[in-house]
Image (cartoon, rainbow, N blue to C red):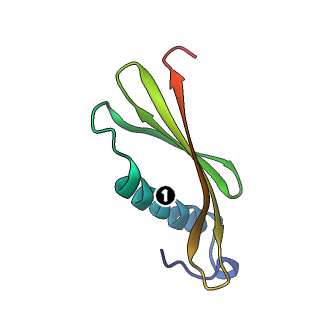
Amino acid sequence: MNAQSSSHQSAVGRSRCIIEAILEDIGATYTQVGGGGISAIKQDATNTYTVSISQEERVDQITYEVEIGSDGKVAIVSRKEGTKSMGE
């Protein structure tokens, strides 16, 4: 994902580039087709985001750690999947 140099971009612009890279990754890797879709994208820390995807009786959560390189490209450093039961 190309992004402007992080030193020339606002925090909202950086977040947008990161979220676009995450959405692209979810489109390529997430295989659960049922459920209600993405219910939340939350920035947990500067370079950590959690995506919640509603399913019938659970919420799949994918946590991403990302970085923006000196070339302005967003790189996914790590991706962790988890599940949260409804009501937790």
Q: Quadrant of residue 82?
A: top right
Q: Does residue 57 appear left or right of residue 69 in this picture?
A: left
Q: Amino acid at mark 1?
A: Ile
Residue drawn at 55 percent across, 63 percent down: 18
Q: Is residue 42 above or below residue 71?
A: above
Residue drawn at 27 percent across, 33 percent down: 34
**Viewer-closest of 15 and 62:** 62
Q: Is residue 62 above or below residue 87?
A: below
Quadrant containing the C terminus in the rendered view: top right
Residue labelled with disc 1: 22
Image location of residue 22, percent across then percent down: 49, 58
Residue found at the very far bottom of the displayed protein: 71
Q: Does residue 33 appear left or right of residue 73 in this picture?
A: left
**Viewer-closest of 49 and 57:** 57
Image location of residue 40, percent across then percent down: 48, 39
Q: Is residue 44 above or below residue 13?
A: above
Image location of residue 66, percent across then percent down: 63, 62
Tally the marks. Answer: 1
Residue drawn at 61 percent across, 85 percent down: 71
Q: Secondary structure at mark 1?
A: helix
Residue drawn at 63 percent across, 70 percent down: 10
